[in-house]
Structures are given as C-alpha cells and as structure tokens.
Amino acid sequence: MPKKLFIKTYGCQMNVYDSARMAELLTPLGYAETQEAAEADLVLLNTCHIREKAAEKVYSELGRLRQAKEEAAAAGRAMTITVAGCVAQAEGEEMLRRAPVVDLVIGPQAYHRLPELIARVERERSGGLADTEFPVESKFDLLPQERGPQDVSAFLSVQEGCDKFCSFCVVPYTRGAEASRPVAQVLDEARRLVAAGAQEITLLGQNVNAYHGAAPSDDGSSWGLGRLLFALAELPGITRLRYTTSHPQDVDEELLAAHRDLRVLMPFLHLPVQSGSDRVLAAMNRKHTAADYLRIVEQLHAARPDLALSSDFIVGFPGESDADFQATLDLVEAVGFAQAYSFKYSPRPGTPASALASQVPGPVASERLARLQELLNRQQRTFNAETVGQVLPVLFDRAGRRPGQLVGRSPWMQSVHALLPDSARGQIIPVRVTAAGDNSLAGEALDAVGAWVAQPQPLEASAS
C-alpha cells in the first residue's frame, strides 16, 4: 500500500516548482500525494520567508499538525513532519526548538537529499533533524530527469538565488548567491515538459533575467536570458513562453530583442519597482532610480507595443515620507499597470532595513497602502475593461466553477471564462470578451471562423 504525502506550498512560484520536484523525488520511496494532512504519513510544508506573516503562518500550521500527529500515533501510525524552503533555511534550529513536532528541517538548496534524510528520520526518530547547510553541488544536477504528466502550463526553474542584496530582502540569505542552470539542461527539461503535455512554459528564478547559464558549446561562454528564450522558442510544441521574476537592472538588449521578435513570448512582464522615490530606492539598495525604471518601460513598449506590466510595491519603508509616497503614486500613474502586488513593509530579521531608524507608524503605512491599492485596482479594472469586444487567444487549462465552463489565461495573464466542452482543455481558442471584472474576463468562444456555438458567459466575481 503506498504511503501518503501531503504537501502545502507557501509563497512564490519557485516554491510551487520545488514542491513538484520534491514529490517526484519521493515517488520511488512509495509516496503518493493526498489532499488530507490528517491521513498523511509524510507532511511537507514548503515555506516562504519574504514577510513576517508568511513565516508565522507556518508556525500556526505546525500547531494544527501537532494534534494530527498525536492522533496518528494513537492509531499506531507514524507521521513525519518536514519543513522545507526559506523559513527552514533561516530558522532551522529555532524551528526545532519552537516546534518540536517537526522531524526534519531542510533548506531550498538541499531538497535533492530529501529521500536520504526522510529515510534517516524514519530510522532514528530521535527528536528532529536539521539539515539547512547549502551543499556544494547543484541540486539541479541531482534531480530525477523524469517528469510526471504535466498540465498544459508548466514551470521550469532556470536560475536561483540573488546577488542584489536589497536591504529589505532575505532571499540572498535563504536562497544563496545567483546560480544558473546550464543551457543544455534547461532545453532538455523543456523538451521533457512538452513531451509530458506542457504547451506554456514559465521560466523561474529569484532574479531570472540575471540568468547566465553555461553555453551548450562547452567553451566556457554563457548565455543570457534573451538568448535562452530564442532557443526555447525553436522547440516544437511550445506555444507560449513567460518568465518571472525580473530585476530592472538586468533588462538588456538581447532580452528586449526577444520581446520584439518572439511571438511565443507573451506580452506580459512582472517587473518589480518597489517604490517611486529615488531616496527610498537608494535606501532599499535597488540600484535603479524611478527615471531608470521609466526608461526601461519605454524601451520594452518600443520593442513590444502591446506589452502589459505587473509590479511589486513596498509601502511604509523606514523613513518613507509623504513626498516619497507621492512619488510612488506618480510613477504608478505614469506607467499604468495591468496587475500589481503591494504590501506594507515587514522587517525581516538579519536584513539591513530591519535596523533602520524612522520606522513608519503602522496606521500611516496602512493608510498609504489603501490609497496605493485603490489606484492599482482602478488601473487593473481599466485594463480589463479595455478588452471587452476584443477577440483574445486563450489557453484553456482547467474547469470552471459552473457546469460546462472552462477557464484559461489570456496572453496578459487574465483569467478568462467561457462555455466549452472539456475536450477544448489544452487548446488555444479565440474568445470574444463580453464582460470584464476586477480579476477576470468572460466571453464567448470562437474557432478560426467563428463557428463555435456558445453563449456569453456570466462574469465571475473573481478569478477561478
């Protein structure tokens, strides 16, 4: 009888990718995934340490799992609880002290050793094992090549770590220095993903456009992200390419050329700016100014006029004045974002910003965040509303909430609902948009000559 594995993933898309690879690593040990933590033999929490609340959610979950583990033991069944990811890397020994229910703590650079460490825990069960050291070898060299059946959209990790050392960020400390996978390894995994059913591939990295993978020629040279995208675009079966997350400093001419020349590279880019104030950007150690960001946005739009942008914003960074915050609002107005993520500053232990004086009072930060989000939400609604009446190519990948409904993604990452048979899943189908909401679009599906017989979809309140 197979053992049961429950995985809960927090945070970024890199963690989603890592969770999938960990499940693949554990398959040879007889583990099959379950959706119920209480029935699992192995519970794996893959954690994020970007904000304080993200870390505290993990401890709350561990509190709930303690009872499940006790009930399993009373029934004569051992439950192994493992914490992986960035919280594990940052707080390994502290986590074992604070949450003794944990059997194993493993950092994001070492998860290729998970089968070995799980076997050790199962043999020893001696009160917890921390293994958060960064290994010398690359984890990507040691992961299994085989990939299971894929959804129509798949993640492919090409770069990990960051050398930027933004003063608010823990990534350089939890994920380590920038490291890029060799080009040949990336292309091989992309071929396997396509063979397993993927059409759309999203390249992942903490700073993905800093990619500098070893060239296939093995002559000591390296490729940047732009050249890698050109090579991926030539692989049969790939209909869409995306990449995330980027840094403005690493947008170069080759990447601009990829946006200009590759139709399979989707016209949507997540390009975090964090603030519109040069003074705050300098304190964040972002290494770009607001003018630099606006210049890069102009270059991107010159290369791909239909490109839409998403971004990240931190409000209430230490020392942020009313004028600094107004500069952020001014930048948002100047750019016009299709989507954005915005947060109040959250001090992370060990980062330079956590020791800065002039912390912004919570009520002030909250009021600023509300104003910024109102503006960003208005821009997103406007962007969505402008698609009404247009015909968009939508890649349908999942069932909707209503009978006979499928949901897919537009080139600009909008969720789109339409009435379609399940056989349309995995296809790119033209959809005439009939309604737009804050988070999704609804429409009627067409084929190339408009022959699909379907009724306009009722608009969902939010994306499915």
Image (tube, helix red, strand yellow):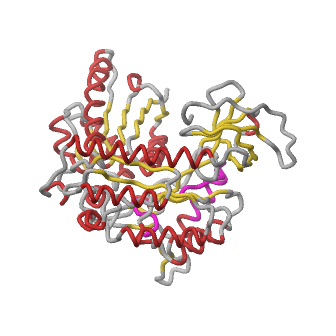
Q: In the rendered view, tell whether residue 70 sits above or below residue 325.
A: above
- Identify the magenta region: 187-210
Q: Quadrant of the C terminus?
A: top right
- Which residue does the image show at 63% across and 59% down from the upper left? 191
Q: How many marks?
A: 0
Question: Residue 271 placed where, x, y %?
Answer: 45, 61
In which quarter of the view is residue 56 placed? top left
Of residue 21 and residue 368, the one placed in the foreground of this image is 368
Going by the image, does 134 lie left or right of 410?
left
From the top left corner, tell me how far across and down residue 15 is, in percent. 41, 48
Residue 324, above or below 24: below
Residue 352 lies in what quarter of the image?
A: bottom left
Up/down of 111 relative to 292, above or below:
above
Q: Position of residue 452 (x, y in %)?
A: 84, 38
Locate residue 248 relative to residue 146 in the image: left or right. left
Q: Which residue is located at x 27 percent, y 59 percent? A: 323
Was residue 202 drawn as part of the magenta stretch in this picture?
yes
The magenta stretch spans residue 418: no
Q: What is the residue that sits farthest to the top in this orientation? A: 75
Question: Does 402 sit left or right of 309 as displayed?
Answer: right
Instruction: Work out whether residue 245 or residue 204 is closer to the camera in this orientation and state it.
Output: 245
Q: Nearer the viewer, residue 138 or 175?
A: 175
What's the residue at 31%, 63% (across, down)?
Answer: 277
Question: Going 28% across and 38% down the picture, which residue do you hit?
Answer: 121
In-front residue for pair 53/457: 457
User: Which residue is farthest bottom?
Assistant: 219
